Structures are given as structure tokens and as C-alpha cells.
Image: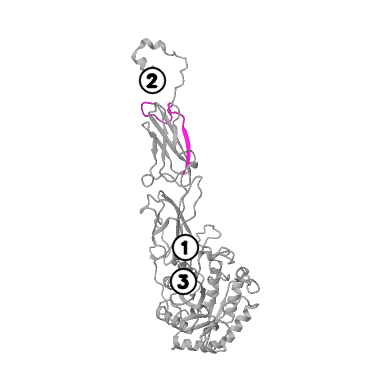
Amino acid sequence: MRPALIVFALILTSGAVAAAFPTAGTALAPPVVLPAPTLTGPPDGAVLTSFSPSLTWRNPTGATQVHVQVIPANNDGPGVDLHMGTAASSLEIPAPPAWYGLLPDMTYTWRVRVSDAPSFIDPSHASWSPWAQRRFKTPQVTSSGIAAVAPSSGATNVSLTPTLQWANSRSGLYYYEVQLSRDPAFETDPGKATAAVYWVLLHGGVTKPANSFSLPAGTSLEPATTYHWRVRPRVQGDGRPVAWSASFSFTTEGPSPSFSPLGPSRPVIGQYYAWYDTDTFDPATVSDIPTVRYNSDDPATIARHVREARTAGLDALALSWLGPGDRRTDGNLQKLLASGAQQGVWATITLETDKPQFSTQSQVIAALRYLRQNYEERPNWLRWQGRPVYLFWRPGGVARAGSESALQAWISIRDQADPDRRAIWIMEGLDYNLLDVFDGQFGYSVAWSPNVYNTTSNWASRVRARGDRIFMATAMPGYDDTRVRPAPEGFARDREGGAYLAQTWDAALQAAADWVNLTSFNEWIEGSQIEPSVSYGDTYLRLNKEWSDTFKAQ
């Protein structure tokens, strides 16, 4: 016991011994305090494996109460400040949801002191021992275990005031950051941003339901619009922020788009490729990369592409197609039609005539019959004047029997696949004799031409000389395949800050084109894409929209 307490007790007991104690003006001896406790675990500087560590120590003899603190780096977050009224020698920090305390990848200082006071004392009392102190660091985490619960990624007809909910296979986490935007890149730089980004910090343990985000009261999303969202665990103090989770998407409810049975009167069609993986976008093989690297099979990616096509003024996307049941192109054609139907965009195919899947005429005929039976009746299969539209790549590469010419081969194919000539068949290439069987023509690329005005005008004249045929002019933003095709085969056509796209569109207008083909929406290997990219953002979506509007106003 402290001497002052003894003196006080003795004075009360017997005045006869009062002279044995200091008289007024004599300095009292400083109180004797207990030594600091000995910390035993975890070791100083330990990196924990869980968010529920057990802190242990040995108390000196005589300890009656303990004071424990757990302090986050820079005081950035919750901690522990616990006065224990017993001589406890351990503290088990509960993991969520029992207690929401420790944050990931952060250094915490933990310290303990003791007192021998017989009753509860305040933190400033002189009987407290020195602190015994150590540090530990909480586990590092990633976003890899985060998955969308609701709405599911790719969901449609979602409420304008949705609650976003996620699950995390990694236990012990409760503090999260969430982003929600129409922009799949979640760009927040005011000079580059194309859409607002909700960016919130929330306690997933207290939201209802757990791990969820709801829009602020009085706000709502836009109807019939695709949104993207992602989540990551919050890291503070001296920790390092972690990468975001995979991006999830959904499309909000809204009026169902209506598609005229006649189709668009002056269609603008973008060439579309749906056979990419994330490793396609290697700077060694492409001249630019998308703002969001993607796998073409992802429904959310296709939904985003449809939205961007609409933003760019494209009426339709023509998916390069490799035949019935092809895992990628046929499967993704179905997704394209479904997403286009929700967002007001038409779809068709560009049949890859020279590919192995069409090595016989029978295969071509079977493929066209398959399309007619399975897709033509979809409300957004591209039509013109009520007739379904098909595009054909390199028709000169068609399979032939014996000495049969390409024209003879195509007549035979059409007589069997479209005997009543109910469809519109548009050929790519410059063999104008094929216009005896095809209904129109386009050239895939004009990037090689030294004068796009002369080239486009010449093509238009050659098509119109064949009678009542459709001339589909070609617009392009530029071209660069030099990373996969060495010179002289490969070449680049500079974009000139959008001026080249303007030239090709202006040439189409001056040639009074019936339709316009855009090469391309997303041909990344040849560098002709208008899809948003790291180098250009959404610049070419906006530029193409301006020209498309001008064309349709003619």
C-alpha cells in the first residue's frame, strides 16, 4: 500500500504516534509505483494472420487493475482504451461481427500498464506503472473474394434506386469503399471524366442488409442505362490501398425500346468483334488499349459496348461471325441481340466467308439458314425497308466447285439459302460483278487510299452503274497494324486528332452514300477502333456521333 494511505490510517487510529510523521513544511517521499508489466505475445513487430489477436502479458506482484490501449497508426481508425478492474493478463480482441475494430494492413501500437490501487482509479492517477509497449500489423487483404450479390452482374430492369450488395469470402472485414458510375473506367479527373462517380466509404457491419450501399435519399439513377460498380476493403493509416474488385454492371429499368419493322432509313453500322480476351490487349500487339480490358464473353462488356455504340450514333453493330454454335461469336451474337433489344441498338453479322468454318458451300448455306431460323425474327435484327440485312466479308473467298466462278458459287448459295430474295445481302470488296447476286457493296478499309474523296466517289459510281444497288461508304478514325504486320504489309494511317475520321465521313456525304459502314467499333489489332481507349478516352464516340447526326439529317 502507498505510505500516504498508511499515515492516514495511523492518524485516525492513534494521535500518540503523530510525531513520528513529517511535520508541516517537510517534503513527502514520492509514491512507489509498480514496475511495468512484461508483454508476452504477440512478438513486437508481428504480422497477424487474423483480426482477432490475443494480447498477453505478465503482471508484477501486487497489481490490482490493468489499463490496455490499442492505437492505430496516425490515430486513423478505431482502437481500444480499456480499463480492466482486475489483474487480468490477456485481452482477446473479438473479430467482426462481435466487435468492429481492427482495419487491414495497418500498424497498431498496443500497450499495458498496471496499478496496485485497491479501488478503481482514473487514468491520471499517480499509482499507474510505466507503459509496456509493442507493435503489430494486421493482415494484408485483397478484393479477390468480393462478389456481387444483388443486383447480379449483367442484370437488367433494375430499380432506379437499387441497393447494391456484395459478399466477401475473406472474413474479418467490415469497412469498404464503393464506386458506382455510368463510366466503366470510373474516371474521377474532372478534365477526363465522362460521367459522375459515386464514391462512398461505409461500414458494412451496420448497413441494412450487411455489406450494402443504397443511393442517398431523394436521388435516383437514369432509366434504361447501364451502370458499373465495384468495391474494395478500406485501408487506412500506414497501409497501402488495395486494387478494386472486378467491375459489376446492371441496366436500369425503363421504357422498352421500340424497333420499327422497316428498320432505320439510313443505317450507320459499326464493325464489331467479340473474340477478345484480356491478354489480347498487349502493347506489343496493339497500338492502344481500351480503358477497361475485357473478355468479349462477359455480358456486362457487351452491354457496355451497346451503350457506347448508341452514344457514337451507330444504329447497328455487325458482329464478325464464325458460324452456328461457335462458342464465342455465336454465343456472343445472342448476348448482343439481347442487350441491343434492351438499349435500342440493332444487330447483324458480317459472315467471315474465308474462314475454315465455311470451307464448303453447304456450310455457308446451313449457316445462313440457321441465322434465318434462329435470329431473323428478333425485334432488333437489322432490317432495311422491312428486309433482314446480312454483311459478307471477302466474298471472293467463297468455296467453289471445280471451275466455278465466285459469282456462280454465290448464285447457287443464294438460290438455296434465300431463294425468294427476301433479305438484303451486302458484300465487302471490289468485285462489282458480284452485284449480280448481292444487293449492295462496301469497302472495309479506305486507310490505304491517298485520296479518300476520290476512292469513295469511285466506289459509289461503280455500285450505281450496276443498277438499283446500295452503296455503303466507309468511315474510319485511322489505322495501325504495324505491331502484327511488319512493313511493307503493315502500315499506319494517322488519326490527325480526329481529322481523318472527318475526312472519311465528309467523303461519304459528298458521295451521297445510302448507308455508312464504320471500320470499326473495336478492331484493336488493326487500330481502327472508336471504343474508348487509354490514349483517346471517348473522343471518337463523340466525334462519330456528330457526323452520324449530320448524315441522317441529309
- Name the front one of labels 2 and 1: 2
Give residue 174's position: percent from left, percent from top. 41, 49
- Residue type at mark 3 is Arg
Q: Label 1: which residue?
A: 182
Q: How is the model colour-coded?
A: one colour
Between disc 3 and disc 1, the foreground one is 3
Q: What stretch is highlighted in magenta?
A: 117-137
Q: Nearer the viewer, residue 217 or 34?
A: 34
Q: Residue furthest left?
A: 13
User: What distance separates the C-alpha of mark 2 from that of mark 3?
Assistant: 86 Å
Query: What x and y, as percent, mark residue 114?
Result: 42, 30
Separation of marks 3 and 1 at Cα, in angstroms = 26 Å
Residue contact at pointers 2 and 1, CB within 8 angstroms: no
Task: Give the residue type at disc 1.
Answer: Arg
SS at badge 2: helix
Quarter holding the C terminus is: bottom right
Quick check: is 124 in the magenta stretch? Answer: yes
Mark 3 and mark 1 lie on one chain; the one further toward the N terminus is: 1
In the displayed structure, 153 sits above or below 60; it is: below
* Separation of residues labelled 2 and 1 (CA atoms): 72 Å
Q: Please tell me whether the stretch drawn in magenta is mainly helix, strand or loop.
A: loop
Which is nearer the N-term, disc 2 or disc 1? 2
The residue at which mark 2 appears reads as 5
Which residue, given by chain and number where applicable, does mark 3 sit on?
A: 328
